[in-house]
């Protein structure tokens, strides 16, 4: 388990939401202080509060933007970044079967009690999102 995976898991277990925990794992390395990362991610947990796009995935996308995003309207860089985000989303879908919070929770509910874990079952999605982005960053260097 990497330091970032451990940090994300720790933040999630402390009660932060999935987006906050995922984003926070990368914040310092990207030049963002932890408090700002927690504030930025606070609106994206539980699928933006509507069980929509998984917050761990959203946190991963925000972190990816900090490392590989664009701040000028360069269409080539924009397309490359969007392609990378789609590829990471597909990697997440392949691992977990869905991208939306409501669908991921349904899949967890279909599993036996041993697989469901505690009352906050999304820890594996948080840790998985961190791993996917780490793999992407490692592959690009």
Image (cartoon, rainbow, N blue to C red):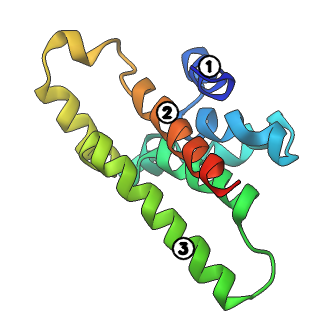
Q: Quadrant of residue 134?
A: top right
Q: Is residue 111 left or right of residue 56?
A: left
- Label 2: which secondary element: helix
Q: Which mark is residue 126?
A: 2
Crowding at label 1, few (<14), some or many (≥20) Cα neighbours within 10 Å?
A: some
Q: Quadrant of residue 101?
A: top left
Residue bearing the label numbered 3? 82
Could one spot residue 51 in this view of the protein? Answer: no
Where does residue 77 sit, x and y in percent of width and height? Answer: 68, 80
Crowding at label 3, few (<14), some or many (≥20) Cα neighbours within 10 Å?
A: some
Label whose residue precedes the other's in the sequence (3 or 1): 1
Residue bearing the label numbered 1? 6
Between the residue at mark 3 and the residue at mark 2, the CA separation in whole angstroms equals 21 Å
- Label 3: which secondary element: helix
Which residue is pictured at 50% across the width and 29% down the height? Answer: 127
Where does residue 58 sit, x and y in percent of width and height? Answer: 53, 52
As drawn, 10 above or below 20: above
């Amino acid at each position: 388990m990497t330091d970032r995976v451990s940090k994300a898991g720790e933040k999630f277990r402390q009660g932060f939401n999935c987006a906050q925990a995922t984003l926070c794992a990368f914040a310092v390395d990207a030049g963002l202080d932890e408090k700002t990362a927690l504030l930025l991610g606070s609106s994206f947990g539980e699928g933006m509060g509507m069980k929509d796009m998984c917050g761990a995935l959203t946190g991963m996308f925000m972190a990816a933007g900090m490392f590989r995003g664009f701040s000028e309207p360069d269409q080539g860089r924009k397309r490359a970044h969007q392609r990378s985000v789609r590829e990471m989303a597909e990697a997440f879908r392949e691992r977990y079967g869905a991208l939306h919070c409501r669908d991921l929770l349904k899949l967890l509910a279909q599993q036996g009690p041993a697989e469901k874990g505690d009352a906050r079952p999304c820890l594996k999605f948080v840790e998985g999102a961190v791993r996917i982005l780490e793999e992407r960053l490692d592959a690009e260097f």
